[in-house]
């Protein structure tokens, strides 16, 4: 029992009613509030957490509690697994679901709100039974981290697990991932893994304990696409804030553009690859039907598949001494000198507008390039293309040796530079950084993407 719960004489799982101390409002009226819910594990010693019947969590500071009533004592939380007898279906493809963490394929103790990984095949099917009709599922957790703690070393680890799963007979790979840095991982895998097997990253914006969770539908849709015989790496997330459809995005052209909406991921300077609509229930099977619509050319997506055999090749060499630097008013050249003097090999600038940087930064940029660093330019506008031929600022940057990344996102450019610098010499990298290699740069800018 935590110090918080011990002093309040309650325990995890107890159903409690908490009344707060009276506080004066702006109108000088004294009010108190009553909360009713199930006690959850404390995150801080001075705050008690409860899960209310609405499904939302509430945190109440101990110092504000006037009275706490235990309405019923809680039981020790336990997860009872139902017996499953799952047989492989010859007509279905074999899909491996790999977890790196996140909430998309976890189970929740609804009594306390505690989230637990659900990563055996049986656990996944208990959580999302619809998977049984889509594919033969195998599941494993290769790590369990918050995606903000993702490292390039972990990208390599995931790539190695992908290679093993494909060599062991997987027809498709689904990677469950936290959403914060999922687009970085997706880009890294696109550069590191060459395979004719679809590799699809999937996340969830809302945790599994919330009525508005997007986890189940995202997992169903990603597994469905993993059976489609595509080649390459993709990201699958909700296409709108309801539950009508999901979008499949190209790994190197997608970005998280909202902190909390279920349709937070958007294709940038490109359209989604495909869309999966959730239809009404099939009257014969009483199960929901799903319809896939390809937005990109389906033949192009499957062009690398020449036979029914699966193949995979990975290259996990990455140069980690690469920096991503956002340009802002007042930025000082000292930061560029720091990177240069501390052994960095490359810098991606996230410039303003068409790809600009203030003149006060010119000496620092020149210092970096003169000392052998590769410096390339993206734009912080997110949408649009770098064009350093329009204004004198961009022309001067090019004269120094700054290379345009065209319509590549800053995140993809960072990962691409890491990959190129580890596998090619500097002159080769200068040629390749601004050229399309895996779909990261489009030849023409699309006028209307909405």
Image (spheres, helix red, strand yellow):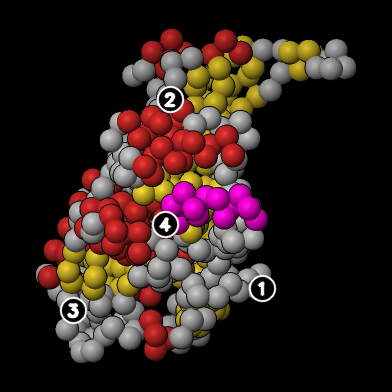
Q: Residue furthest right?
A: 27
Q: Is residue 54 above or below residue 333?
A: below
Q: Secondary structure at mark 3?
A: loop
**Location of mark 3 (residue):** 310
Mark with earlier residue (4, 2):
2
Which numbered disc, 2 or 3, marks the residue closer to the eye?
3
Circles 1 and 3: CB distance less than 8 Å?
no
Q: Position of residue 53 (x, y in %)?
A: 56, 40
Mark with earlier residue (3, 4):
3
Q: Position of residue 38 (x, y in %)?
A: 48, 32
Rendered image: mark on residue 448 = 1
Which residue is found at the position 49% from the left and 36% from the top? 363
Q: What segment is highlighted magenta in the picture?
A: 391-403
Q: Position of residue 248 (x, y in %)?
A: 46, 70
- What distance separates the C-alpha of mark 3 from that of mark 4? 27 Å
Within 10 angstroms of label 4, few (less than 14), some, or many (20 or more) residues? Answer: many
**Location of mark 2 (residue):** 43
Which residue is found at the position 46% from the left and 28% from the top? 334
Q: Quadrant of the C terminus?
A: bottom right
Q: Nearer the viewer, residue 397 or 441?
A: 397
Circles 3 and 4: CB distance less than 8 Å?
no
Q: Is residue 443 left or right of residue 115?
A: right
Q: Residue 61 appears in which quarter of the rendering? A: top right
Which numbered disc, 1 or 3, marks the residue closer to the eye?
1
**Location of mark 4 (residue):** 412
Q: Secondary structure at mark 4?
A: helix
Q: Is residue 204 left or right of residue 105?
A: right
Which numbered disc, 3 or 4, marks the residue closer to the eye?
4
């Amino acid at each position: 029992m935590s110090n918080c719960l011990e002093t309040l004489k309650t325990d995890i799982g107890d159903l409690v009613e908490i009344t707060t101390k009276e506080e004066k409002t702006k109108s000088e009226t004294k009010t108190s509030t009553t909360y009713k819910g199930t006690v959850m594990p404390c995150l801080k010693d001075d705050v008690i957490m409860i899960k209310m019947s609405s499904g939302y969590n509430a945190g109440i500071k101990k110092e504000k509690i006037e009275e706490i009533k235990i309405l019923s004592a809680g039981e020790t939380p336990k997860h009872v697994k139902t017996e499953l007898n799952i047989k492989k279906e010859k007509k279905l493809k074999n899909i491996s679901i790999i977890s790196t963490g996140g909430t998309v394929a976890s189970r929740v103790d609804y009594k306390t709100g505690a989230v637990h990984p659900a990563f055996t095949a049986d656990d996944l099917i208990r959580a999302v039974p619809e998977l049984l009709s889509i594919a033969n599922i195998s599941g494993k957790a290769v790590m369990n981290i918050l995606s903000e703690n993702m490292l390039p070393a972990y990208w390599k680890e995931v790539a190695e697990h992908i290679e093993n799963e494909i060599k062991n007979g997987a027809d498709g790979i689904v990677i469950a991932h936290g959403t914060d840095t999922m687009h970085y991982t997706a880009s890294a895998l696109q550069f590191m893994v060459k395979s004719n097997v679809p590799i699809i990253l999937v996340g969830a914006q809302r945790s599994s304990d919330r009525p508005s969770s997007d986890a189940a539908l995202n997992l169903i849709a990603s597994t469905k696409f993993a059976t489609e015989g595509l080649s390459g790496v993709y990201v699958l997330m909700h296409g709108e804030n309801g539950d009508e459809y999901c979008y499949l995005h190209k790994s190197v052209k997608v970005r998280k553009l909202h902190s909390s909406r279920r349709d937070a991921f958007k294709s940038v300077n490109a359209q989604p690859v495909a869309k999966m609509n959730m239809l009404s229930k099939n009257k014969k099977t009483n199960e929901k039907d799903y319809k896939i619509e390809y937005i990109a050319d389906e033949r192009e997506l499957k062009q690398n598949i020449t036979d029914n055999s699966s193949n995979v090749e990975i290259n996990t060499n990455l140069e980690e001494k690469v920096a991503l630097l956002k340009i802002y008013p007042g930025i000082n050249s000292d930061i560029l000198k720091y990177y240069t003097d501390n052994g960095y090999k490359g810098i991606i600038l996230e410039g303003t507008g068409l790809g600009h940087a203030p003149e006060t930064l010119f000496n620092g940029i020149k210092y970096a390039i003169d000392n052998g660093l590769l410096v390339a330019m993206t734009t912080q506008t997110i949408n649009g293309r770098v064009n350093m031929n329009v204004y004198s600022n961009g022309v001067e940057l090019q004269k120094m040796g700054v290379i345009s990344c065209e319509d590549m996102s800053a995140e993809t450019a960072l990962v691409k530079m890491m990959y190129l610098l580890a596998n090619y010499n500097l002159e080769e990298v200068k040629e390749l950084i601004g050229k399309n290699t895996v779909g990261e740069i489009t030849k023409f800018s699309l006028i209307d993407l909405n």
